[in-house]
Image (spheres, rainbow, N blue to C red):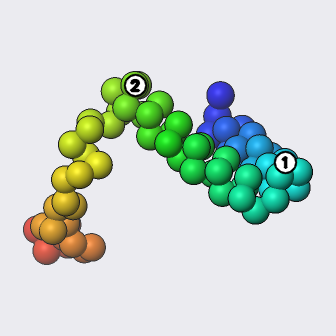
């Protein structure tokens, strides 16, 4: 399933939740969707638990490759 279809389904689910359940239901569906996404990435092996708590690498600067030349 392509990411466009996944995005379409997520948008439709949020739209239905917002229309029928109000803003609180919209936020609940969005939060549970984000948790499900992170859990799915973890179970697929694309994400390590330490990635969520480790600070970003400060050595990465835009244009870094230009300086290496």
Classify residue 50 by image quadrant.
top left
| Res. 8 in view | no
Q: Residue 16, labelled with which disc?
A: 1
Position of residue 46 in the picture relative to residue 2 (left or right): left
Position of residue 44 in the picture relative to residue 36 (left or right): left
| Res. 35 in view | yes
Furthest residue in direction top, as rendered: 44
Residue 10, given in percent of the width and then of the height, sits at 70, 44
For the residue pair 48 and 23, the one nearer the viewer reads as 23
Q: Residue 4, labelled with which disc?
A: none
Q: Residue 43, labelled with which disc?
A: 2
Classify residue 33 by image quadrant.
top right
Mark closest to the chain's N terminus, 1 or 2: 1
Residue 16, given in percent of the width and then of the height, sits at 84, 48
Q: Residue at x 53, y 47 (%)?
A: 34
Q: Residue at x 23, y 51 (%)?
A: 53
For the residue pair 20 and 5, the one nearer the viewer reads as 20
Residue 55, given in percent of the width and then of the height, sits at 19, 60
Q: Residue at x 67, y 38 (%)?
A: 6
Position of residue 3 in the picture relative to residue 52 (left or right): right
Q: Is 21 situated above or below 59?
A: above
Callout 1: SS: helix
For the residue pair 52 and 2, the one nearer the viewer reads as 52
Quadrant in which the C terminus is drawn: bottom left
């Amino acid at each position: 399933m392509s990411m466009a279809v996944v995005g379409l389904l997520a948008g439709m689910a949020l739209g239905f939740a917002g229309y029928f359940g109000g803003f609180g239901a919209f936020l609940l569906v969005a939060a549970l969707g984000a948790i499900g996404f992170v859990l799915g990435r973890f179970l697929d092996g694309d994400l390590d638990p330490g990635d969520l708590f480790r600070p970003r690498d400060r050595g990465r600067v835009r244009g870094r490759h230009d300086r290496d030349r």
